[in-house]
Image (cartoon, rainbow, N blue to C red):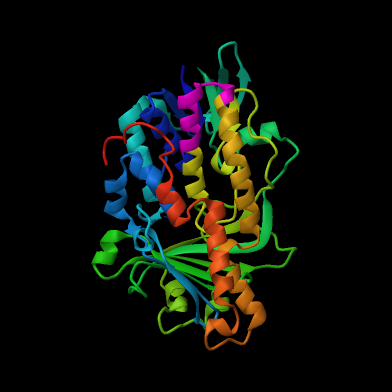
Amino acid sequence: MTVLIAGGGIGGLALALSLHQIGVPCRVFESVPEIKPLGVGINVLPHACRELIELGLLDELDRTGIRTSELAYFSKHGKPIWSEPRGLEAGYKWPQFSIHRGELQTILLKAAIERIGKENVLTGHHVSGWEETANGVRAFLNDKDGNEIGSAEGSLLIACDGIHSTIRAKLYPEEGAPIWARRILWRGITKAKPFLTGRSMIMAGYQQVKFVAYPISRDDLERGEPTINWIAERELAADYDWRREDYNRAGKREEFAPWFENWNFDWLDVPGLIRNAEYFYEYPLVDRDPLERWTFGRVTLMGDAAHPMYPIGSNGSSQAILDARVLAREIQDKGETNAALLAYEAERRPATTQLVMLNRGNGPEQVMQMVEERAPQGFNIVTEVLTQDELEGIANNYKRVAGFQVEALNAKPPIVRGKVAAGT
C-alpha cells in the first residue's frame, strides 16, 4: 500500500525521499496551498548532512549553502570563550551546511516531485483526522477553510505536521499550547562583510541576551558580501503577552535592538547587522514536554510533531531528518507495520527526549552562561573563568547526546541500506 505523510516540511519531505529510496510508495499532504521558501537560516549538522548526501542531494546543497568551517562562542564583550572546527575541517567524512531554511525545503520539494511525482505531493490538503481500517489507515482531508475534501487510504500515517500538529493534538487533547521559555528570537537577514573565517557560525552573550550569526548564501559569499543570517534573543518578563510563533511574522526592531546597541566588536558589527537587515521575523522560544508514547496503531509522530525542541545546538531540522531515515530503515526491515513504527520509536524517542531536556539547559551554549555568571564584568582569557576540561567536556557531551561525535559517526554504518540515491 502507500504510506501517508501529514506535512510537507523538511521532515516530511525527507521521509518521502527515504521511502522512495527503499521502494515504498508514499503521498505527502501539506496544509498550505503553496509551499513557499519561508524562514531564515538553519544549520544542518554532519550526521544529517550524511543522510541528505545519501539521498543524492549534495550538489544541490553545495549550489546554495555554505560548508560551515567553525563554531565559536563569545562573551557579551566579544571575548572568545570556545571555538571548534566543524564539518570536514573537524575530521567528519561529511560537511556541515549553513543554508536558508526555505532553500533546503525547496531542494527537498523539487527532489520529491521529481521522484515520487507531483500527484503525490498535494498542497492545500490538511489531515484533520483518521481511522484504522482492516488493512491500514484512512486519513480525512480538509482544505484551508476547513471544508472536507475527501480521504486517503494507506498502510501507515506519519505525523510530520509540526509543533502545532493536529494529529498530536488528537492523541493528546489535554496537552495545550507549546511551553514558552520567556525568550523571544528575532531572526533576520543582512548583506554584510565576511567575519572570522568567512564560514564561521558565532554565538555571543548569555541566556538573557544572545546574538547568533552565520553566512548562508554561497554565491553572495563568493562575491565578497555574504548574506548573514542572525538571531537576536532576549528574555522577557513572565507576564509578557507572547504571540504564537510563525515563520512569516515581521518583528519590531525597537523591541530588541537597544539591548545590542553597544555590541560593536572589532570582528563583528552587531548593531549594523540589525540596522541594515533586509527583513527579520519574531519567534517565541518554545518547546513541548517529551511524550511517553508516539505510536498508536498505524500512526506515529515525527520531527517537531514528536519532539519540538529549542533551536539550540542546531538540531531541530537535523533530528527530523534522522527520524525520517530511521523510520525508513524500520519499514524496510519490518514492512509497513505497527512493528516498524514501534522499532523506530524505541530508537528515536529516548534519544530526542534527552536532547529536548539538554537544550532546555542551553546545551553546548551553557559555556556562555557560565562565563556570565562567573565573570559578568569580563575577563582577559577564558581559562581565568572556565577550565579547558570544562569547555571540552560540555562540547563533547552535547555531540554524544545529539549523535555526532566525529569518530563514532565516521565509523557508524549507513542508517538506510542499499545504494545511494541518484543525484549525488
Quarter residue 297 falls in:
top right
Look at the image and say whether residue 335 sits in the magenta stretch.
yes
From the top left corner, tell me how far across and down residue 25 is, in percent: 41, 22
Q: Left of 189 or right of it: where is 58?
A: left
| Residue 33 in the image: above or below residue 242 | above
Residue at left offset 63%, top offset 84%: 375
Please tell me which residue lies in front, 223 or 37. 223
Range covered by the magenta-colored residues: 325-339
From the top left corner, tell me how far across and down residue 8 is, in percent: 46, 37
Please tell me which residue lies in front, 256 or 45. 45
From the top left corner, tell me how far across and down residue 99 is, in percent: 38, 55
| Residue 375 in the image: above or below residue 144 | below
Q: Quadrant of the C terminus?
A: top left
Please tell me which residue lies in front, 217 or 206. 206
| Residue 189 in the image: above or below residue 97 | below
Q: Kindly report the secondary structure that dominates the magenta region of the rendered protein.
A: helix
Look at the image and say whether residue 365 sits in the magenta stretch.
no
